[in-house]
Image (cartoon, rainbow, N blue to C red):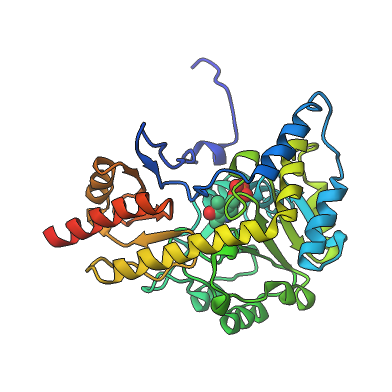
Amino acid sequence: MAEQVRVRSAVDAIEEYRAGKSAPAGAFKLSSNENPYPPLPAVVAAIHDAASSVNRYPDFGAAPLIEGIAQHHDVGTDTVALGAGSVALLAQIIQVTVSGGDEVVLPWRSFEAYPILIQLSGATAVRVPLKTDHSHDLEAMANALTSRTRLVLLCSPNNPTGAVLPRTELEAFLSRVGVSTVVVLDEAYVDFVNPADRIDSLVLLRTHPNLILLRTFSKAYGLAGLRVGYAIAQPKLASTLRKAATPFGVTNLAQQAALASLSSQSDLVTRTNQLSVERDRVQTALEQSPVDSPRSHGNFVWLALGKDSEAFGEACSEAGVTVRIFGGEGVRVTIGEPEANDRFLGVAERFAATE
Ligand SMILES: *Cc1c(COP(=O)(O)O)cnc(C)c1O
């Protein structure tokens, strides 16, 4: 047989990441959990200013942005590691913790990128099914830990089901994980959680040297297109993550936009709160319908439609909203402009009526 291009067999087995469908003209895109609001004028101005220096590499250490993030969370600059999106940081975390034969315990269903990145490393993804209320089954996850487990992923609010981890359960879980096993708490949607349901994850860092918090500017901050996220961990682990970063991965445009966003905190919080209020409105409307839609704490809602998922997704397309279909399981719908959400709710009402 003719010689063939050879790549690692672990890579051959991976399915490509399927991004949320883009919306046709005139339709609303509610398929990628993006922020529907365009960047604030101050952020656009910062990007504009930075444009004239793209012939230069970005500031490698990104000291001003790291300083800004550290101040924002009241933590030391040595606890922060930047990445080109939090997904890049997750790839770094996997790179520094696991190799072939190791196990990574994760909840499922959760973020699509997790199993892909794990399989790329050659490690085994141990998927622990969510509970029937669509939240993490921490008891089962703790029972899934073995001597080969090098990494655990947690996602709160969970993408795509929207459930949050309660503080006491999270603390109990962390106490069952040995300190030699790294635990990631992906908080991409934390800014959409109502204050009463929010936990102070930063406090947990003090007592857990194996914990990494992941945050992003993509969702609440509306900078998905610029790719910037960060991890917070105890200094030793943060420094390890910085070693594994792609050199110059976070562009100067992204750094300046993120800095300008941190300076526009109050305007951004107003927007984020509006989206959370809008989510609660959509959620309340869904609760009146027979569709199983667990309470979501993110900027999206989950409809556990099972075999009806595809038909529902098509009905949404016909109504001018593009949603994310998880075949045979459910549909995730991002909270967008009120008009977009109303279109989607209209489909949900009609769909429920014809069931
Ligand atoms: C959107 C999302 C992210 C953010 O990824 P970025 O690379 O920062 O854009 C991270 N985790 C989860 C669970 C997400 O849904």
Residue located at (68% from left, 54% from top): 98
- For the residue pair 161 and 42, the one nearer the viewer reads as 42
Q: Position of residue 149 (x, y in %)?
A: 63, 65
Instruction: State which quadrant residue 133 falls in.
Output: bottom left
Instruction: State which quadrant residue 73 falls in.
Output: bottom right
Q: Is residue 105 left or right of residue 287?
A: right
Q: Is residue 24 left or right of residue 300?
A: left
Report whether residue 149 is seen. Answer: no
- For the residue pair 136 and 288, the one nearer the viewer reads as 288
Q: Position of residue 174 (x, y in %)?
A: 65, 77
- For the residue pair 228 and 52, the one nearer the viewer reads as 52
- For the residue pair 100 and 174, the one nearer the viewer reads as 174
Instruction: State which quadrant residue 72 falls in.
Output: bottom right
Q: Is residue 262 left or right of residue 126?
A: right
Q: Position of residue 26 (x, y in %)?
A: 35, 35
User: Does 203 sit above or below residue 318?
Assistant: below
Of the 4 image quadrants, the one containing the C terminus is bottom left
